[in-house]
Amino acid sequence: MRLAETEYRVLNLVWAEEGITAKSLAEALRHSIGWSKTTTYTIISRCIQKGYIRREEPKFHCYSLVSRDWVGEQEADALIGRYYADRPEQLVASLLARGKLTAGQLSALGTTE
């Protein structure tokens, strides 16, 4: 699964306010990034078709069907597959080599096996 940036923007607002109306989504996205109402409704429709959100009437309320965590896991898997040949240890090695992890973060990575 690859979530488009436009779909992620819509989902972010739905996660922040479950049951937000499409009208409110369109208004928020018009103010924040200049999208037209038509653009927002097109992206909402795409999210519905892909099973990311559901629509309820009246007033076209939007609810998420996927969690932020699930999307993060899917995106992480795609990143590891694309850039690290499905070898997550290479991603961690890259982060370590570049000093991107603090001692606390390293401690939190302790295994449970």
Image (cartoon, rainbow, N blue to C red):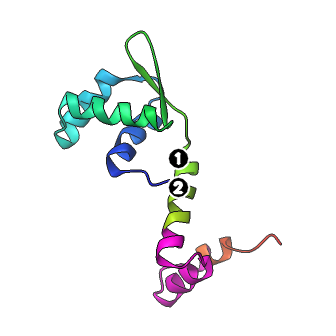
The residue lying at 34 percent from left, 24 percent from top is 22
- Please say whether residue 31 is one of the residues in the magenta stretch: no
Specify the amino acid type for callout 1. Answer: Arg
Q: Hey, which residue is sitting farthest front in the picture?
A: 49
Q: Is residue 100 magenta?
A: yes
Please state the horizontal and vertical placement of residue 107, each as a whole percent of the image. Answer: 67, 76
**Residue tagged 2:** 72
Residue 108 image-quadrant placement: bottom right
Residue depicted at x 55% and y 40%: 66
Q: Residue at x 48, y 68 (%)?
A: 79
User: Left of 87 or right of it: where is 8?
Assistant: left
Q: Give the residues in magenta.
A: 79-104
Q: Is residue 38 above or below residue 8?
A: above
**Please, what is the three-letter code of the amino acid marked with disc 2?**
Gly
Residue 97 locus on image (x, y percent): 50, 90
In the rendered image, the residue lying farthest to the bottom is 97
State if disc 1 and disc 2 touch (CB < 8 Å). yes
Residue 16 place in picture, x, y as percent: 44, 36
Question: Dot 1: within a 10 Å radius of its alpha carbon, few (fewer than 14), some, or many (20 or more) residues?
Answer: some
Is 26 placed left or right of 106 in the picture?
Answer: left
Q: What secondary structure do most residues of the magenta stretch adopt?
A: helix
User: Picture coordinates of residue 92 (x, y %)?
Assistant: 57, 80
Q: How many marks?
A: 2
Q: Residue furthest top?
A: 58
Q: Is residue 79 above or below residue 54?
A: below
Residue that mark 1 sits on: 68
> What's the CA distance linking mark 2 and mark 1?
6 Å
Dot 2 alpha-carbon crowd within 10 angstroms: few under 14, some 14 to 19, many 20 or more: few
Q: Is residue 40 above or below residue 55?
A: below
Per the image, label 1 sits on a secondary structure element best described as helix
Q: Is residue 68 above or below residue 92?
A: above
Q: Quadrant of residue 109?
A: bottom right
